[in-house]
Image (spheres, rainbow, N blue to C red):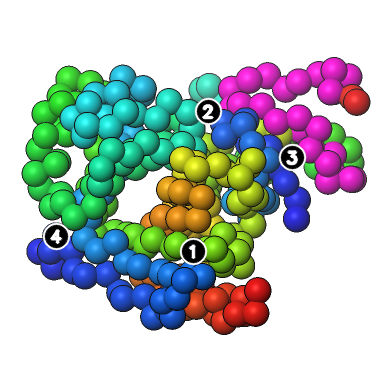
């Protein structure tokens, strides 16, 4: 079973306790009324879907209940880094092991 | 309907062979609260309860039949076995007055069981993917987790004694699968 390290529990926990939350760092435009339709559609519907490192949100719903962010390699499914919600995305170079 | 809930009817009786290797007992009626707030709120609630608020996440502190389980960074489960929720709710609300918090009575939402015996951890492992060995889940550890498709709160009270809290409607499911695991572990 895939083990995910929860930054709040500070422990490796089974994947079944988690829910996937989509791409991380997608900021809602501060003033939607002034945003063009294209930009709004971009915010609503378009995601990076990269092959390789992907910053994404996870929720430890059957545990501490918290959302956090993770840097996962979409090819190998390996979690390279986990960090608390609100923290900036760690530099990929830093996290290379 | 609210009256029926407030009465906190007797939890389902575990249909479980009671033997020296593993026994499953219902803890009966208990007062339970979910406290959300920062650490000062937990400290005040702990003082009102007579229990030291657990400082670390996924740990529990107990004093007599009362206990506090820290389930998340800002979430505590307060349990008082055999007590009525009304009296405790008053004293907790009084202690927490003026401190930002949320206190919810969940006494009738869930039921508690004590699973005891040499095979106890093995039976839980039949449905729970957590590492339950001493190093990873020592005595005093408590966490919300899953048992097959049911969400449970798991608390290790002693080396071979486990407390399980489960939402009421999931109780027959949990009991049934533990009994099934007990049959499967008969030769161990």
Please report contact status of discs 1 and 2: CB closer than 8 Å, yes or no.
no
Is residue A65 rendered to the left or right of residue A68?
left
Q: Nearer the viewer, mark 4 or mark 2?
A: 4
Which mark, by number, is residue B6? Answer: 4
- Residue B119 pos. (x, y %): 56, 66
Instruction: Tell me the subunit letter for badge 2.
Output: A
Q: Nearer the viewer, mark 2 or mark 3?
A: 3
Label 1 – label 2 distance at C-alpha: 60 Å
Label 3 – label 1 distance at C-alpha: 51 Å
Q: Is residue A77 above or below residue B94?
A: below
- Residue A11 pos. (x, y %): 64, 36
Labels 1 and 4: the sequence-earlier one: 4
Residue B135, visible in the rendered structure: yes
| Residue A39 vs residue B30, the one in the foreground | B30
Over which residues does the magenta segment extend?
Answer: A71-95
Is residue B106 rendered to the left or right of residue A88?
left
Residue corresponding to mark 3: A47
Residue corresponding to mark 1: B117
Residue at 55 percent of width and 76 percent of height: B182
Residue corresponding to mark 2: A32
* Image quarter in which the C terminus of chain B is found: bottom right
Q: To which quarter of the image does residue A93 belong?
A: top right
Please report contact status of discs 3 and 4: CB closer than 8 Å, yes or no.
no
């Amino acid at each position: 079973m895939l083990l995910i390290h929860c930054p709040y529990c500070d422990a490796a926990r089974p994947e079944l306790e988690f829910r996937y939350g989509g791409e991380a760092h997608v900021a809602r435009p501060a003033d939607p009324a002034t945003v063009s339709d294209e930009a709004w559609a971009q915010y609503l519907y378009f995601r990076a879907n990269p092959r390789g490192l992907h910053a994404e949100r996870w929720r430890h719903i059957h545990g501490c209940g918290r959302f956090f962010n993770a840097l996962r390699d979409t090819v190998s499914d390996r979690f390279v880094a986990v960090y608390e919600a609100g923290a900036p995305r760690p530099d990929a170079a830093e996290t290379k092991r | 309907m609210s009256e029926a809930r407030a009465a906190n009817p007797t939890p389902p009786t575990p249909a479980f062979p009671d033997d020296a290797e593993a026994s499953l007992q219902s803890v009966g009626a208990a007062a339970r609260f979910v406290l959300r707030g920062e650490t000062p709120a937990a400290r005040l609630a702990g003082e009102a309860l007579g229990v030291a608020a657990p400082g670390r996440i996924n740990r529990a502190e107990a004093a007599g039949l009362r206990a506090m389980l820290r389930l998340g960074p800002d979430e505590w489960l307060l349990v008082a076995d055999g007590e009525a929720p009304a009296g405790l709710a008053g004293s907790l609300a009084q202690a927490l007055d003026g401190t930002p918090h949320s206190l919810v009575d969940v006494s009738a939402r869930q039921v508690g069981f004590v699973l005891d015996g040499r095979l106890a951890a093995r039976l839980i492992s039949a449905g729970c993917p957590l590492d339950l060995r001493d190093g990873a889940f020592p005595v005093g550890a408590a966490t919300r987790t899953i048992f097959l498709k049911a969400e449970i709160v798991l608390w290790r009270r002693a080396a071979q004694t486990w407390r399980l809290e489960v939402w009421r409607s999931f109780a027959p499911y949990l009991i049934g699968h533990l009994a099934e695991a007990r049959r499967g572990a008969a030769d161990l």
